[in-house]
Amino acid sequence: MNVQQAHPDLKLKQVLHLKDLIIYGVILIQPVAALPLYGHANDISQGHAVTSILIAMVGMIFTAISYGRMANLYTAAGSAYTYVSKGIHPYVGFVAGWSMFMDYLFIPIICIIYSAITASHLFPVVSYLSWLFLFAALFTMLNLRGLKIAALTNWFLMIIMSIVVFYFMGSAIRYIIIHHGLSGLFSSRPFFDPHHFPLHSIASATSLAALTYIGFDGITTLSEEVSNPKKNVLLAAVLTCVITGIWSGAQIYLAQLSWPDWGSFTRGITDEATRNSALDTAIMSVARRVGGSLLDVTLTFILLVGSIGSGVTAQIGASRLLYGMGRDGVIPRKFFGHLDKKYSSPNYNIIMIGMVALLSSLLFNYEQCARLINFGAFFAFMMVNIAAAIEYYFRKKRTIRTLLINFLPPATGFIICLFIWVNLPLMTFVIGGLWMLAGIIYLAVQTNGFRQPMPDINFS
């Protein structure tokens, strides 16, 4: 029994203000979120990576409005699962939650992969395969020992990351001015190349670049602790997406101006693995061009540290989610609901996720993992937009004013998220579709063929 159950009159203090929420959102997303995506997004979009990031930002702004409005109705929940369950139907809510659950599993995988990529760049004498095993073991051992990344560490990392990003951007500005003059800083080409603007390629890149914003919805989990939550949660979610989009877009814009020949990263490379490796480390190549080996090593190191921090946190988050479901008897309690006596950690879940993450890191590359994370996230985003439209428009008195205020924003968010989602590759839909099918089958078993209510599960 927790404190609130024993003393139902106790409530969380509403001490968080708008700036606190925005800073929390930026920490969740990370100031360097767009940099690992640069090579692949620029290659797929054929030199329009910054355009892809900004298109995704528009969809995230409208989706953030829907999240904020749903958080106003259900302040104690803060999850796509609950919002969709309340707004549409509990079965649809479960499927939305199940899609987000895929993210919990794939984020540790992509962190292992990117940690190995950056470590291989710093220490090429050690093989990429060896790094995969090392980081999978490191994440698992840290979590088994009950070691946590403290909030103070997150603040420190955010400050250091921001300093390194400013260092990178300053070096890029200096490089551009030296080689192209002050006017070289102002160009429409990263946004729109009149000689070559492939819409389908840009749409495909947008479905990858959208990973930049994953995590903004974590703001809604703090609704109970926010002063003036009806205003501040919505504003914080929107402003976090805007700040992230402008900040990330500026980084990629300068990278594109510093290295305008986007095709040169992979020109002449026919081997797929070598090609992917070149795109994985493209941002390091830009850093070396504009700031020499010092910036290359500094940026790579901070990307490595950030990836390790995210990986450790993501693995424990996934294991805790499984523990909660196991404790409540939704999945086998004996295995998933087990806690280590010494460290009070869900050790069976941690080991299982570590093994799954390692095996998956051998099968997938960085881009494939990013796409799969977006598959689950954007399905949930679409459902939250629909839920917001139902709650605020279809269940209210419908007028021209409510059409503009309560229907158009979630409808716009849904359409842009759908645009991003449908432009994911076919293989992503095959793998993601199989995951969704497994969830629907599980739901059917749990509800006796959809004849019984779904047990309440906390996916937040």
Image (cartoon, grey):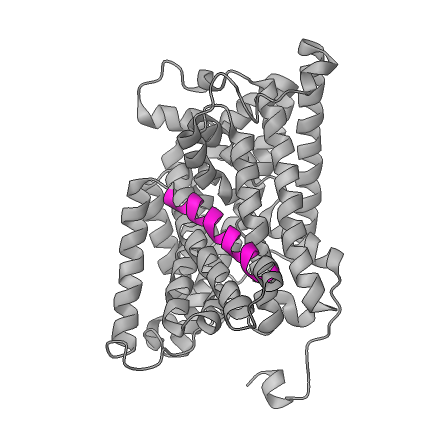
Compared with residue 262, is residue 76 higher up or lower down, i.e. above or below? below
Q: Looking at the image, which residue is at 48% across and 46% down?
A: 416
Give the camera-side residue of 309 and 397: 397
Work out whether residue 26 can be spotted. no
In the rendered structure, does residue 31 fall within the stretch colored magenta? Answer: no
Q: Quadrant of residue 171?
A: top right
Q: Relative to residue 427, is residue 31 drawn left or right?
A: right
Residue furthest front as drawn: 400
Which corner quadrant holds the N terminus?
bottom right
Give the camera-side residue of 207 and 291: 207
Compared with residue 129, is residue 447 higher up or lower down, i.e. above or below? below
Q: Which x, y percent locates residue 219?
A: 61, 60
Give the camera-side residue of 149 and 64: 64
Q: Relative to residue 130, is residue 253 drawn left or right?
A: right
Q: How many marks?
A: 0
Q: Looking at the image, which residue is at 39% across and 49% down?
A: 375
Compared with residue 419, is residue 235 higher up or lower down, i.e. above or below? below
Q: Which x, y percent locates residue 102?
A: 39, 56
In the rendered structure, does residue 417 fall within the stretch colored magenta? Answer: yes
Q: Quadrant of residue 333?
A: bottom left
Q: Relative to residue 131, is residue 434 drawn left or right?
A: left
Q: Which x, y percent locates residue 17?
A: 75, 62
| Segment tinted magenta in the rendering | 405-422
Work out whether residue 143 can be spotted. yes
Q: Looking at the image, which residue is at 31% across and 19% down?
A: 270
Q: Which x, y percent locates residue 302?
A: 60, 37
Magenta: main secondary structure equals: helix
